[in-house]
Image (cartoon, grey):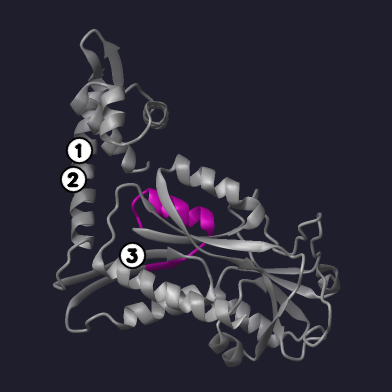
Amino acid sequence: MNTQYFRYALEVEKTGSITQAASSLFMSQPALSKAIKDMEKTVGFAIFKRTSKGVLPTHRGVEFLSHARKIALQVQKMERALQKEDTTHQLFSLAIPRAGYIAQAVSEHVGTFDRNTDMEIDIMETGAIQTIDAVADGYFVLGIIRSREEDREYFLKAFAEKYLHYESVWRSDYVALMRKDHPLAQADNLTPEAFLSYVEIVLGDEDVPYIRTSEARAVSGDLQNKKRVLVYDRATLYDLLRGNPKAYMWVAPQPEEVLLGNGLVQRKCPGIGKFEDFLIYRSGYRFSRLDHAFMDTLYLHRNKVAYAE
């Protein structure tokens, strides 16, 4: 269950009113009502009842709220620790996609931590849906997801349903990534159709079948390669590309160091579509000093890749 829901329930208990609680939480009354109903559906019983004295907890609701209060206090303590401005304990928590410039920014940021001071760093590379759930449920503080242009509204709706704030980090065109000696590496006027006879390396996400597993889909239709290798690890995909002169992958523009280090090239291909990277975090979260420092580093690495195109 989203730990943010506990805060909502406790505010309703405190005010005795959905309307007053929504105002205190800076959200709409319908949104709060829906959140409470979703929470009651999840636990399997009514937490509140309407009476002449206002909205009051049910008998089972009182017990539930007691547990919710304990959990909320623990989450609050964790967030306060994460937001400390001193350097007595360095905490950083982030879920990210398998992406070159983001991974480089994380590596550089972590390298700036004081090795003589306690640190707790939690980094997870995973898919977009898993990142959204991990941030909403409080397992990670920050998250970055990548969305295709046509999936944008789906993800914005998911952010709203999970009460997540977001900001757009980068929006650009996909490119084709391949070995320098790939048959299309030096070809002119590339089109998506030109790649259909070659092997596509895909970052798959089998847990989310309604999100396409192949990025090889033209904006104009249902173009999809029948020769695909699904992988779930960034290092593995580079190995596969290096080892197969006829493999390729649709990716966000890669840092020059990644291209040179793996003997790869990237080529623009009009018509393959755009992506957008979003930073997400829970409603009400205040960035720590280390969070702000990471964002500065992230934008520096994004700009290096964006301006090199």
Name the amino acid type tagged 1: Arg
Name the amino acid type tagged 3: Ser
Indicate left or right for 76 with 156 as reference.
left
Does the magenta run of residues contain 238?
no
Q: Earlier in the sequence, mark 3 or mark 1?
A: 1
What is the quadrant of residue 123 in the picture? bottom left
Question: Marks 3 and 1: which is nearer the front?
Answer: 3
Residue plotted at (44% across, 73% down): 299
Q: Nearer the viewer, residue 36 or 280?
A: 280
Which label belongs to residue 200?
none
**Picture coordinates of residue 174 (x, y %)?**
66, 69
Q: Residues within 10 Å of mark 2 (few under 14, many from 20)?
A: few
Which label belongs to residue 73?
2
Q: Residues within 10 Å of mark 3 (few under 14, many from 20)?
A: some
Indicate left or right for 116 with 251 as reference.
left
Circles 3 and 1: CB distance less than 8 Å? no
Element marked by disc 2: helix
Q: Which residue is mark 1?
A: 69
Give the quarter of the figure containing the C terminus.
bottom right
**Picture coordinates of residue 79 (x, y %)?**
23, 55
